[in-house]
Amino acid sequence: MSTNEKRLAGEAAIRYVEDGAIVGVGTGSTVAYFIEALAGIRQRINGAVSSSEQSTALLRKHGIPVLDLNATGPLSLYVDGADECDAHKRLIKGGGAALTREKIIAEASSRFVCIIDSSKRVNLLGKFPLPIEVIPMARSLVGREIVKRGGQPVWRDGVVTDNGNWVIDVHGWQITDPVGLETELNQIPGIVTVGLFARRPADIVLVGDKEI
Ligand code: 5RP
C-alpha cells in the first residue's frame, strides 16, 4: 500500500471535474485526498453527493455542500477508491462498509473514475474478502448460501452500516466470472448489496496519477 500513490490519485481525479458539476464522492482514505483537492476548487462546483456519513462529514468540514441524490438527478462524475481492481476495471469494494451507497451513486453516474494505489491491482478478484451487506435477520441464511457456493463467510462483528445493516466478508473465492457471481448473489433474499462492481465497472482507473 502506498500513501503517496493514494494522494496522487486523489489529486489527479480533479482533472475530470467539470465546472458547475455535482460530484459523486466515494469513501475511504484515497477519497479523503480527493475531497481535500476538491476543497481547493469548491467555488467551481455546485456540490457533492456523498456515499457515507464519513465522507459527508469530511465534505462539510471543507465547506462543500452535500446534496441528496433524489434532488440532483443523474451525475456526470463519480470518484471512488477500491479494494481490488482487475484488468477490465471490475472492482471489489466495501472494505469501508459503504458499498451500498457507493453502488447507487456509481449506477447514477455516467463516468466512474476509480482512484487506487498499485497494491489494489489484481489479475483475479477475490483475494480481498468480498464484502456483502445483509439485512441483519438474513445473516445466517446468506452465510449458508455462501458456504454452498464454496465461500467462507465471516461476519464483520460490531460493524453496522450507514443503512443499519451488517456486513459479511467472504473468504476463499477466486472470482473467475464477476458479472455472473454478482448477478447470482443479487438474487438471494436478504442480500442488500454485493461488493462486486462488475455489472457496472469503473470507466477510468487512476493508479497514482497514471490512467490505465
Ligand atoms: C469503502 C470502499 C473503499 O473505496 C475501499 O475500501 C478502498 O479504501 P481506501 O481508499 O481507504 O484503500 O469501498 O466502502
Image (cartoon, rainbow, N blue to C red):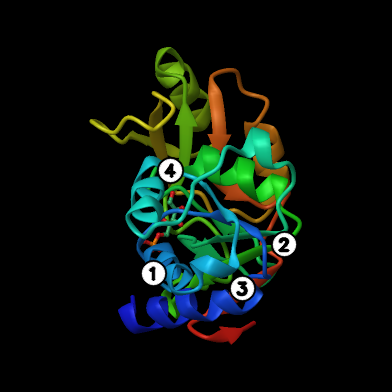
Residue 41 is situated, as x and y percent measured from the top left of the image, at 51, 73
Residue 45 is situated, as x and y percent measured from the top left of the image, at 59, 63
Task: Name the residue type under label 2.
Answer: Arg
As helix, strand or loop, the secondary structure at mark 3 comes to strand
Query: Which of marks 3 and 4 precedes in the sequence?
Result: 4
Crowd tier of the residue under label 3, counting other residues whose Cα lies within 10 Å: few below 14, some 14–19, many 20 or above: many
Q: Is residue 113 left or right of residue 158?
A: right
Determine the CA span between mark 1 and mark 4: 16 Å
User: Which mark is in front, 3 or 1?
Assistant: 1
Query: Which of marks 1 and 3 precedes in the sequence?
Result: 1
Image point 62% across, 83% down: which residue?
211
As helix, strand or loop, the secondary structure at mark 4 comes to loop
Q: Residue beneath label 4, please?
A: 52
Determine the CA span between mark 3 and mark 1: 19 Å
Residue 32 is situated, as x and y percent measured from the top left of the image, at 37, 64
Query: Which of marks 2 and 4 precedes in the sequence?
Result: 4
Determine the CA span between mark 1 and mark 2: 21 Å
Image point 63% across, 70% down: which residue?
17
Q: Kindly identify which numbered label has been placed on residue 36.
A: 1
Q: Residue beneath label 2, please?
A: 111
